[in-house]
Amino acid sequence: MAELPEHKKLYEALRRLISDGVYAEGDLLPSENELSSVHGVARHTVRKALDRLVVDGYILKHQGKGSVVKGVPKGIGILSLMSTTSAVGDNILTTKIIGRPEVRAWKEAFTFELSDVEKEVGCIYFERLRSLNGKPVFYDITMLPNLNFPRFTSLNLENKSLFDVLRTKYQIEVTGGVQQIFAIKADAKLQEHFRVRPGHPVLRLNRKLNTNKMGVYIYSQVFCITDELGLSGTF
Amino acid sequence: MAELPEHKKLYEALRRLISDGVYAEGDLLPSENELSSVHGVARHTVRKALDRLVVDGYILKHQGKGSVVKGVPKGIGILSLMSTTSAVGDNILTTKIIGRPEVRAWKEAFTFELSDVEKEVGCIYFERLRSLNGKPVFYDITMLPNLNFPRFTSLNLENKSLFDVLRTKYQIEVTGGVQQIFAIKADAKLQEHFRVRPGHPVLRLNRKLNTNKMGVYIYSQVFCITDELGLSGTF
DNA sequence: CCTCATTTGTACGTATGTATC
DNA sequence: TGATACATACGTACAAATGAG
């Protein structure tokens, strides 16, 4: 297992402190010089970690003032969860894996083209149902190429963020991607998962996510009920 | 006018070279040391400029290899039109203004909060119906604060891009924004505009767009039929 | 397969400018 | 006004990945 670079270790440490609520929204982080001496790294290294936290939306920096905690960016990548009725902060998002991750041949990658290498190695496939306060709101299908993911199928992904697992276990970071968005009617499977009536409007997203590993893409199809919450994103 | 910092000047210069096609997709940028000596700045400064180009999606960096031009990020965050059946290039998008732009009090800004200043000055309101090859696909409501838009209500917006008009006539540039996305059923008004049956699934976007003018935001609500085309975006 | 020059990544140091309180 | 904190920018050194030979 490769040792993580200092700036990444600090990034993970600070990110965790924010996720765990040790630093809450509005709090000031320790100054760069303080973090530098406390963690025994150069200020430049601290700045690199903080830069990343800014890009990821955890903090805001203000010259002369300090680094203010913005909060934990919730949701799936760029599109984050947003309640239409009340704040999302008090709500509880739980994740359930349907079936269990398995290796299989690609059926298709929705509307995206697959490379020959991807076709050859097959894919790791799993489905998840995510609920907010017990009500199902996301149903998603995820496919990864079966490359460099030792023991992935035996990992417990319940209530864990896929992105966190990929980053911490496999050093894979999602760097961006493309997505297509549609409004559709619920079919039989969606009706069952979401417990809605036939014809209920559902949001569908086809996504291809880029990573920091050359040639490694994550494909996912996300279905979402937007009755009580919308998908929110900045650009 | 404040002088731009070196790393930003270099960023702008390189960004422009990529936009203008001097460096095309797949090309290798000059090495960091070369850029450093050519532009007379430290390597650290070059790296800062390149970091920004990576974040913005213009280049990819590979250790031991160099910085590869990725291209011009298309419609950053702004969901762009994408056909599900064929290329959109050959299709014709026409815009029709429904009614005519008028000044009125804000009814509401969808789910967004309005400032006191915005409430006081009122808004410029108009609705548009955009069609692809004669079939209506977008119906949108746009609201601007009634500030600094002389003669706006008498402008002819037919078949013109609102963003282009704002930029060329009023020096207002859209710099980003937030949006919420929902899947809904067509109501009576949407049924009529889109000529679809009751209950047809429709995509709804509530958008608040930031501009380069402090305190000036554009609010819009976009309805979209995604039967034959999806909204596509990069992130 | 190995070596070597090149290129980016990490990490350190130092100095000075600028915004906030 | 002064102390503090972040921003910019110069420098050095070595590690790690790439690709040519």
Image (tube, coloured by chain):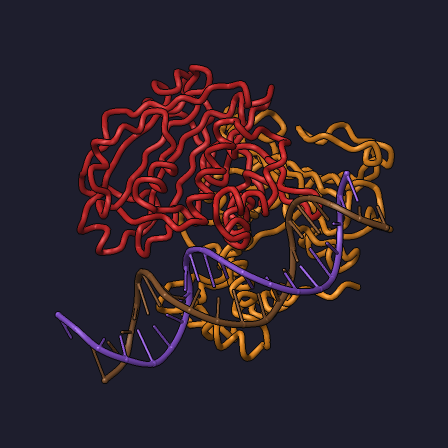
Chain colours: A red, B orange, C purple, D brown
In the image, B39: left or right of B69? right
In the image, B77: left or right of D14? right
Residue for point 52% across, 49% down: A46
Q: Position of residue A76 (x, y in %)?
A: 45, 35
Task: Report how many numbered discs are placed on residues in the image.
Answer: 0
Q: Position of residue B66 (x, y in %)?
A: 40, 69
In the image, B193: left or right of A221? right
Residue for point 50% across, 40% down: A78
Q: Position of residue A180 (x, y in %)?
A: 44, 43
Q: Taking the image as drawn, is residue B155 in sight?
A: yes
Q: Taking the image as drawn, is residue B136 in sight?
A: no
Q: A67 or A77, which is in the foreground?
A: A67
Vertical placement of residue A224 versus A114, above or below: above
Q: A22 or B6, which is in the foreground?
A: A22
Vertical placement of residue A186 versus B55, above or below: above
Q: Quadrant of residue A221?
A: top left
Q: A33 or C4, which is in the foreground?
A: A33
Residue for point 38% across, 63% down: B62
Q: A190 or D1, which is in the foreground?
A: D1
If the image is split into quadrants, where does the C terminus of chain A sit? top right
Vertical placement of residue A143 versus B175, above or below: above
